């Protein structure tokens, strides 16, 4: 199988695994992250095949979709073996996926530029217009209200507090989204994050104005 065919097969596999997923890990999230990862990879001179494969598979191992993180990682590994990705690439892709998700902070830094690229692409999908839309969609699905001026954002959350997710949608900007710009790995990822960050700040300013009945 050529690399192009491996990508095609993996797309179909992931699409099938995630269809009907409503926790924010839907196929279109994967679609956007993969596109962005390819773009950042070319700009940064990273291995595009590794980035594309890791981006496609990055949510398959998520603990929300599996019995455990280990079971999720096993699933990814079996898939890579099935389509005969060579050993070194397989190890690399697995390592990226294992170190990926945010979980309230404190995850190990990415060891390779390919890992940095995929992590940047995933974070960027939580920012900008898409990030705003995902935040309100997620909050709505959880039954959270969008805003209450008397509920202040939490400053230092434990992993447990973060995972309870009983905040307002607006507070999620302060508890997570506005911090992501400072966590970007690659120069091009940083640049894209700056743009999307600015867009969210403008959104919040307008939101507060309208909240108070201003123009
Ligand atoms: P995490 O990596 O923080 O576990 P997910 O990947 O599960 O987050 O989040 C899916 C989407 O939902 C992201 O766009 C994220 O910003 C958003 N989201 C996560 N937690 C909340 C929350 N408590 N309120 C609103 N949006 C949230
Ligand atoms: Ni993701």
Image: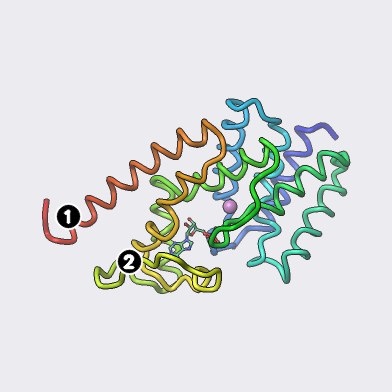
Read off the residue under disc 1.
209
Identity of the residue drawn at 14% across and 61% down: 212
**Mark 2 or mark 1, which has the lower sequence index?**
2
How is the rendered protein coloured? Answer: rainbow
Residue 188 left/right relative to 118? left
Residue 146 tag number: 2
Residue at 64%, 58% in the rendered image: 18
Q: Quadrant of residue 7?
A: top right
Q: Secondary structure at mark 1?
A: helix
**Residue 51: x %, y % from top left:** 68, 38
Tell me which residue sits at (84%, 41%) in the image: 85
Q: Is residue 71 left or right of residue 201?
A: right
Residue in view at x 73 percent, y 71 percent: 67
In the rendered image, the vertical position of residue 117 relative to residue 98, given as above or below: above
Instruction: From this view, report whether residue 7 is shown above or below residue 109.
Output: above
User: Quadrant of the rendered structure where residue 60 is?
Assistant: bottom right
Disc 2 to disc 1: CB gap under 8 Å: no
Q: Residues within 10 Å of mark 2 (few under 14, many from 20)?
A: some
Q: Which mark is residue 24?
A: none
Q: Position of residue 204 (x, y in %)?
A: 28, 52
């Amino acid at each position: 199988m050529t690399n192009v065919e491996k990508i095609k097969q993996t797309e179909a596999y992931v699409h099938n695994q995630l269809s009907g997923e409503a926790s924010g890990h839907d196929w279109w999230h994967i679609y956007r992250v993969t596109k962005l990862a390819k773009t950042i990879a070319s700009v940064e001179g990273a291995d595009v095949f590794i980035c594309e494969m890791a981006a496609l598979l990055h949510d398959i191992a998520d603990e929300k979709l599996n019995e455990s993180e280990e079971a999720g990682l096993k699933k990814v590994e079996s898939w890579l073996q099935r389509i005969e990705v060579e050993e070194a690439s397989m190890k690399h892709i697995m390592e990226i996926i294992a170190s990926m998700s945010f979980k309230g902070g404190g995850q190990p830094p990415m060891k390779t530029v390919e890992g940095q690229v995929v992590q940047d692409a995933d974070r960027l999908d939580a920012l900008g217009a898409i990030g705003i839309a995902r935040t309100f969609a997620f909050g709505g699905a959880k039954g959270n209200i969008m805003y209450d001026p008397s509920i202040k954002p939490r400053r230092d959350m434990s992993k447990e507090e973060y995972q309870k997710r009983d905040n307002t949608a607006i507070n999620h900007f302060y508890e997570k989204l506005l911090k992501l710009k400072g966590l970007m790995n690659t120069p091009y990822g940083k640049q894209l994050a700056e743009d999307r960050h600015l867009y969210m700040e403008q959104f919040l300013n307008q939101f507060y104005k309208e909240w108070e009945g201003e123009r």
